[in-house]
Amino acid sequence: MNGSSLPRGVVPPIPTFLDGGRLDERSQRELIQSLRIAGIDGILTLGTAGEGPTLTDEIRAAAIEVAVEVGGGIPVVVGCSGQTADSVVRQIEAAAALGATTALVLPPFYFTLSQASIIRYLTNVADRSSIPVMLYHIPGVTGNPFGIPAVEELSVHPRIVGIKDSAGDFIRFLQIQRTLDSDDFVVFQGVAALVGPSLLAGCSNSMCTVTALLPEPEMALRRAIAAADLDEVRVLMHQISAVTELFRLGSYPLPANFKAIAAMLGIGSGRPHDPAVSPDPEHLAALREGVARLGLLPGGDPG
């Protein structure tokens, strides 16, 4: 697999905005266009924040089509998940036919699996995929982690070209980045609050939800690190961490908070997809207070 074709840099996971059970194309296009203007390097659609596992084939196809069209040639990574290799391969091939460049693949997330089973499953998927495959390590959702030896074994497969690590274990992340990040295997930090430390450690790739709505703090952080402006680095790292806390506020799943905050910023209806429910008024008030406190409401002054 040609390493030069892999997604790299800033590849934010975008939400899937809905309107009456269909894709809200206007909001979807508006967000992607704003991210392109901000200078992102790729798009991840239908991941965790994009509610990929809950959406119909029709909505998935519409979301991929818009991402490919509005992306204008930047890499489009598509989240693919299921309980069997057959179902995941069908998703991958449908995405590839619509122009997706890479598949981000979860391990199965119903039964607890051995590492040998996970390796066998991902090898089966990659053997049959027509586009490159990335591993998606998010054990808090799947209950099935990719152990480091499993990542090492899978990384030699010619079609397995990287990993998004959203576990939040920075020591583990550094070990993977130090030993596996290369021209042919790309390591992405998936936790926004850890992007700063990851950049300082030499990892230049991120897939973080916060950046999908608020790209400027991460872009400014990258500029500050390149300029060795450590005072500005500290300010931006704390700002990104504070926004990350808002995305995780309370017991609602990530897409509920994500879409509610997006609506406060003027994008989308704020409604998550079934089975998630919209936050109650008290929770929405807490989110709005947090967004206002950080100066992120339209017309505000980001601190």
Image: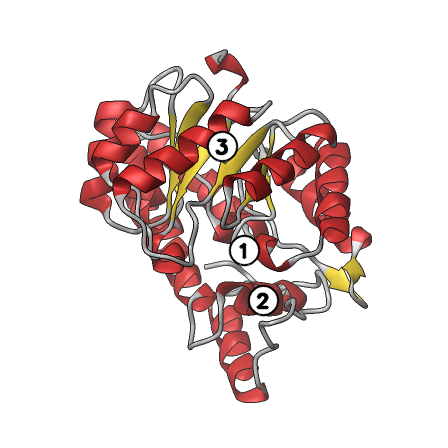
Q: Which residue in the protein does label 2 denote?
A: 261
Left or right of residue 243: residue 14: right
- The answer to whether one can see residue 87 in this image is yes
Residue placed most toward the observer, 22 or 218: 22
Amino acid under label 2?
Ile
Residue named by callout 1: 49
Q: Secondary structure at mark 3?
A: helix
**How many C-alpha atoms fall within 10 Å of the one at disc 3: few (<14), some, or many (≥20)?**
many
Q: CA distance from mark 1 to mark 3?
A: 23 Å
State how far apart marks 2 and 3 are (Cα).
35 Å
The numbered disc on residue 125 is 3
Q: Position of residue 47 (x, y in %)?
A: 54, 49
Q: Point out the tag, 2 or 3, that comes first from the N-terminus.
A: 3
Residue at 22 percent of width and 27 percent of height: 178
- Are the residues at dot 2 and dot 1 in contact (C-beta closer than 8 Å)? no
Q: Is residue 64 left or right of residue 205?
A: right
Q: Is residue 271 left or right of residue 124?
A: right
